Image: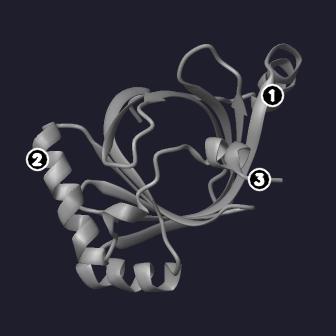
Amino acid sequence: MNPNRTIIELKARVENLDLIRKELLKIGAKFVAKIRQVDTYYEVPKGRLKLREAFGESPYTRLIYYERENIADIKESQIFILELKNHQKFKELAQRILKIRCVVDKIREIYRFKNVQIHLDNVKDLGTFLEFEKPKKDTELDRKFLENLMRQIGIKHENLEALSYCELILKKPE
């Protein structure tokens, strides 16, 4: 895995993951895995920083820093990912020195279609979402590819989400 990369991505709120699954399989997307992810977001002066703990057949822990615009559209993200071997020690240290912004708990199904990773997320206290992530090559061609993929599986532009799951949770009325 390249620790430093640029991707083109989108997030959309969806009502029915079963319908999306059927459409993904119809176009030839391949199921990869179903995992539980717990993302702990920390307060940082710029961008977003989270500790991702994944539970399932192949558990892992990653520290992920990323920068991206808050727009309800297809957008570019600059991402740095660091695999953590001794994640428990890091987590203890982080809790001592960093302020936790929020915790996002989700069940994620991962599919792959051509060079797009597709996530079907059921996020605790928020609902169900779809994400596309594609390595950036040519911004305009990447955008057209993702727009076409949106049409193929029935995702409308008005369902695109601008914010991260953490920001959606913080914005949610108590």
| Left or right: 89 as drawn, with respect to 150 | right
- Sequence-wise, the earlier of marks 1 and 3 is 1
Q: Check disc 3 and report its element: helix, strand or loop.
A: loop
In front of the other: 129 or 118: 129
* Residue 91, label in figure: 1
The residue where tag 3 is placed is 173
The Cα–Cα distance between marks 3 and 2, rounded to whole angstroms, is: 38 Å
Q: Is residue 155 left or right of residue 33?
A: left
Circle 2 sits on which residue?
Answer: 141
* SS at mark 2 in the image: helix
Front label number (1 vs 3): 3
Residue 51: mark in rendering? none
Task: Please identify, in this view, whether the residue under mark 3 or under mark 2 is nearer the observer.
Answer: 3
Give coordinates of residue 103: x percent, y percent: 76, 43
Residue at 40% over, 41% down? 71
Q: Label 1 sits on what residue type?
A: Lys
Across and down, in percent, residue 90 comes to 78, 23
Residue 125 image offset from top left, x and y in percent = 74, 61
| Residue at horizontal 72 percent and vertical 43 percent from the top | 170
